[in-house]
Amino acid sequence: MKFTQVPLKYAFNALEPNIDALTMEIHYTKHHAAYVKNVNDAIAAENIPYKTEAEFFNNASKLSAKARNNGGGAWNHNFFFETLKPGASAGPQGKLKEAIVKSFGSVDKFKEQFSAAAASRFGSGWAWLVNDKGTLKICSTANQDNPLFDNAEVKGVPLLGLDVWEHAYYLKYQNKRADYIANWWNVVDWDVVSKRA
């Protein structure tokens, strides 16, 4: 198997002013591209036998640090970039909205809890909304881990993920991670999130 980099469906500057063009360009062409190259190098060099991404992550605890970290980085960034779109979004609708309200009380309460998980992640990592056998949960993971890993603290099908590594926001926001999180909500593509649910 090989990991690939999904093509962006928007220009680097399309998410301005929420995410700046230079950050998007560096994030996609340097960071993400390196994760994809490095995990594929590890798969070849270590003769990793898994045939699918799901199988790869189901065995994450058995992988080398290089394979695990770069595989997570490749997958997580594809997932993240696919969840973004230019322009205002109406927010979650339909069944996804119903599930969010059932699990968290309201969309606003969900956003508060998700934002708190992203803001409180110490160091580098991610915040996630996952479907755990029909129940929606919020969690965060360190580094490039994700809820598909066999040894994840909270396992489930990821619906939404936010990159809180400094490379995702530092050029524009410096140490103001909370401002980055607040503005990121403006470019979430809820249609993509709904299809994952």
Image (tube, rainbow, N blue to C red):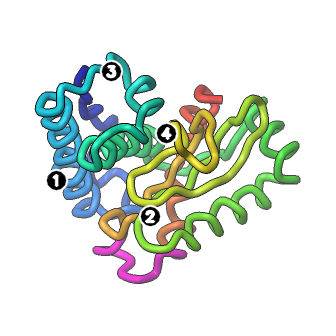
Q: Earlier in the sequence, mark 1 or mark 3?
A: 1
What secondary structure is the stretch in magenta mostly built from?
Answer: helix
Element assignment for label 1: helix
Residue at 58% of width from left, 73% of height from top? 120
Of marks 4 and 1, the one in the foreground = 4
Type of amino acid at the residue the image marks with label 3: Tyr
Residue extent of the magenta highlight: 169-178
Type of amino acid at the residue the image marks with label 4: Phe
Q: Residues within 10 Å of mark 1 (few under 14, many from 20)?
A: few
Distance between the Cα atoms at labels 1 and 2? 17 Å
Q: Residues within 10 Å of mark 3 (few under 14, many from 20)?
A: some
Q: Earlier in the sequence, mark 4 or mark 3?
A: 3
Residue 164 disc label: 2
Distance between the Cα atoms at labels 2 and 4? 19 Å
Picture coordinates of residue 108, whole percent (x, y): 77, 59
Picture coordinates of residue 126, whole percent (x, y): 48, 57
Distance between the Cα atoms at labels 2 and 3? 29 Å
Residue 10 in sight here: no
